Amino acid sequence: MARTELQTQPWSRWRDLQPAAVLGMAAFLVQFDVTAVVVAMPAMAAELGFGVAAYAWVMDAYSLAFTGGLLAAGALADRYGRRRALLGGNIVFLVGSIACGFAAGGPVLWAARAVQGLGAAFVIAGGIALLASTYTRPDERARAFALMGVISGMAMALGPTLGGLVATWIGWRWIFLANIPLCLLAILAVPRLVAESRGPADRPLDWSGVILLTFALGLAIESLLMGRAAPVRVAVGLGASVCLLATFAMQQRRRPAPMFDPAVFGRPVMIGISSLLIAVSIGYWAVLVYLPPFLGAAFGWTGSSVGFALLSATLPMLLLPPYGARLAKHWGWRRLFATAMLVLLVGNLTLMLVASGWLPDTGVILAAAATGMLLIGLGAVLAHPQLSGAVVALVPPDQTGMASAVTVVMRQGGFALGIATLGATLPYDATAASYAWPWLLAALASAGGLIAASMLLPDYQP
């Protein structure tokens, strides 16, 4: 009898985790389309004939739509059904993927990427809420979220390599068209394995807040990318963006149930966590976007060669998250995040040294490039997965829901602004040496995160 129980326990546990697995598969596409597309962007730019600013919009259109959509997705999912929101988002993502695959020019591709980002927002908002409602026991919920984290890590780590192989063998368009069978599989599997759930029906939907924040971020991105030759245009655009953000903050302060309560983020701990989110977005994720053209300019690599090279920066996100969690328990938040930012800083400085042309020969340059990419990956994996846990542990219990949701928005918003900021330093005819400036900005962002972690986070175990 005992033997039978032991034999059936693994199967029973797997059956219990099937909803988490299918929800993780839906989230896999969202993450995969970020890192896989990064490697193929030089091929897109060459075929469709666009420059640095348009290059950046391939990613920023997705991130901007994701950020704005996420603010509305949670309330709509609670009101009309979280499974319905996820499936609807999956269909929108599917339509956007098909449009990306058949895009005939830059504007069509950017619009299709925005459609993908909007769909991704509903997939993520619905998926996280469904996980929480499906697994109510703490141990079950921990396993479910861990499984989703592993699947997301696989998407981020394998995306560059698989994207490079696909772009090299059959063309970049198939990175998007390959989403079709997986989206259809999610449409079939989710209703069979995941029950519908709803949240409070009276959760407010603040359309004016969504519009204000989206326009503020979009105006800042456009000003940075298109106003490089006209500093006055950059200053005016950023000033208008700041005014819109201030209006958004005042509007949220007056709301009885705000989406984004400024009071939550006035505390030193949340200022520190927000600074770390921005530092990782610029120091790692935005750098990842510009590594393919840099490697192409520096070494002549394209497609699959770049994809394999980027494994140095992405594999740590798959292999090392559990070690980061253990270090958090031994070191405490301040030491963990300060160490992560220091490693990220050294990695970006190493990449800057590679771009500077000061290194003596090709072998040293290759070793330094691999070391720099490995270091930014290690720094990111120490910080990125632990930030959500830090939010839950360090803010008051009645504010964890809002704080957790807003950290996702800040990640995406910081990612979009980071891409625009680094891109604004590149000339239209960028050479390998031109990338010293983006890597310097990434290093400065990492240094800011190091200062914030050292001064604003508590030095105790979570």
Image (cartoon, rainbow, N blue to C red):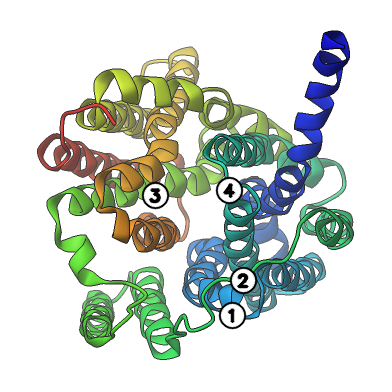
Dot 4 or dot 1: first in sequence order is 1
C-alpha gap between disc 2 and disc 4: 14 Å
Dot 3 or dot 2: first in sequence order is 2
Instruction: Give yes or no for contact between labels 3 and 2 (Cβ–Cβ under 8 Å).
Output: no
Label 2: few (<14), some or many (≥20) within 10 Å? Answer: some
Q: Which mark is residue 136?
A: 4
Q: Secondary structure at mark 4?
A: loop
Residue 11 location, x and y as percent?
Answer: 84, 27
The residue under the point 20% across, 38% down is 447
Q: Which kind of residue does numbered mark 2 sit on?
A: Arg
Instruction: Give yes or no for contact between labels 3 and 1 (Cβ–Cβ under 8 Å).
Output: no
Instruction: Give yes or no for contact between labels 4 and 3 (Cβ–Cβ under 8 Å).
Output: no
| Residue 35 as seen in the image, left or right of residue 344 | right
Q: Is residue 435 visible?
A: no
C-alpha gap between disc 3 and disc 2: 32 Å
C-alpha gap between disc 3 and disc 1: 31 Å
Depth-wise, is mark 4 or mark 3 nearer the camera?
4
Residue at mark 1:
79
The residue under the point 20% across, 36% down is 450
Q: Secondary structure at mark 2?
A: loop
Dot 1 or dot 2: first in sequence order is 1
Residue 215 location, x and y as percent?
Answer: 40, 83
